[in-house]
Image: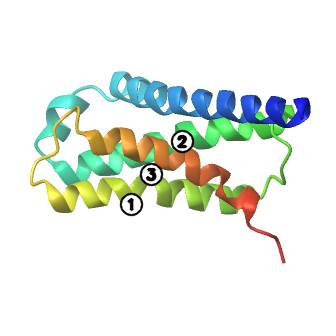
C-alpha cells in the first residue's frame, strides 16, 4: 500500500515538473526570440505553432528526465512518447484556433493544452508493446 502511494506521489510530482517546464520553455523561447510577443499576437496560427512546440518540449523533457533518472518505472519508448505529447499539445490548441478567431494570452485552452501534453506523455505507459 505504501509503495502504491509513493508511486502516485512521484507521478504527480513528475507531472507538476512537466507542467512547470512547459511554462518555463515558453518563457525562455519568448526571451530568445525578440519580438515574439508582438509578432505572434496578430497571427494566431503562428502563435499556436510556437506554443505547441514549447509545450511539447517542456512536457517531453521533464518526462524524459524522470525516465532517465529512474523516477518513473516505465519503458522509455521515446518516439511514441514524443508523438503522443505532440498530439496532446496540439489538439486543444487547434480546437481553440477553430473556436476563436483571435487567440489572446490567458486563453483557457492554453492551460488545457499544457495539461494534455503532460498527460499524453504518460499515455504510452498504458499501451502494451507488440
As rendered, which of 71 and 65 lies closer to the eye?
A: 71
| Residue 112 pos. (x, y %) | 38, 44
- Indicate the secondary structure of the residue bearing disc 2: helix
Quadrant of the rendered image containing residue 110: top left
As drawn, 55 above or below 27: below
Which residue is depicted at the point 62% across and 35% down? Answer: 15
Residue 18 or residue 57, whichever sits in front: 18
Q: Quadrant of residue 21?
A: top right
Q: Which residue is mark 1?
A: 91
Query: Which residue is painted at 44% across and 51% down in the image?
Result: 89
Quarter that holds the C terminus = bottom right
- Which residue is depicted at the point 35% across and 44% down? 50
Q: How far apart in space, not on screen, are marks 3 and 2 (Cα)?
A: 10 Å
* Other residues around mark 3 within 10 Å, as few (<14) / some (14–19) / many (≥20): many
90 shown above or below 42 = below
The residues tagged by marks 3 and 1 sit, at their Cα atoms, a distance apart of 6 Å
Q: Which residue lies under the disc numbered 3?
A: 89
Image location (x, y in percent) of residue 103? 17, 45
Crowdedness of circle 1 by 10 Å Cα count: few (<14), some, many (20+)? some
Q: Is residue 80 left or right of residue 30?
A: right
Task: Check contact, mark 3 vs mark 1: CB within 8 A.
Answer: yes
Residue 85: percent from left, percent from top: 55, 53
On screen, residue 125 versus residue 3, left or right, reads left
Q: Is residue 101 above or below residue 22?
A: below
Where on the picture, by quarter, is residue 107? Answer: top left
Mark 2 = which residue?
A: 57
- First of labels 3, 2 by sequence position: 2
Residue at (83% x, 50% y) in the render: 74
Secondary structure, mark 1, is helix
Residue 30 left/right relative to 38: right
Amino acid at each position: 500500500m505504501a509503495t502504491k502511494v509513493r508511486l502516485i506521489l512521484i507521478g504527480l510530482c513528475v507531472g507538476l515538473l512537466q507542467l512547470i517546464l512547459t511554462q518555463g520553455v515558453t518563457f525562455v523561447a519568448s526571451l530568445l526570440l525578440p519580438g515574439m510577443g508582438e509578432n505572434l499576437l496578430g497571427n494566431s496560427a503562428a502563435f499556436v505553432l510556437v506554443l505547441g512546440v514549447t509545450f511539447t518540449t517542456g512536457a517531453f523533457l521533464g518526462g524524459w528526465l524522470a525516465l532517465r533518472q529512474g523516477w518513473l518505472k516505465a519503458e522509455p519508448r521515446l518516439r511514441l512518447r514524443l508523438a503522443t505529447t505532440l498530439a496532446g499539445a496540439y489538439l486543444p490548441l487547434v480546437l481553440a484556433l477553430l473556436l476563436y478567431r483571435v487567440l489572446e494570452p490567458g486563453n483557457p485552452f492554453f492551460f488545457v493544452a499544457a495539461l494534455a501534453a503532460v498527460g499524453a506523455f504518460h499515455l504510452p505507459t498504458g499501451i502494451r508493446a507488440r
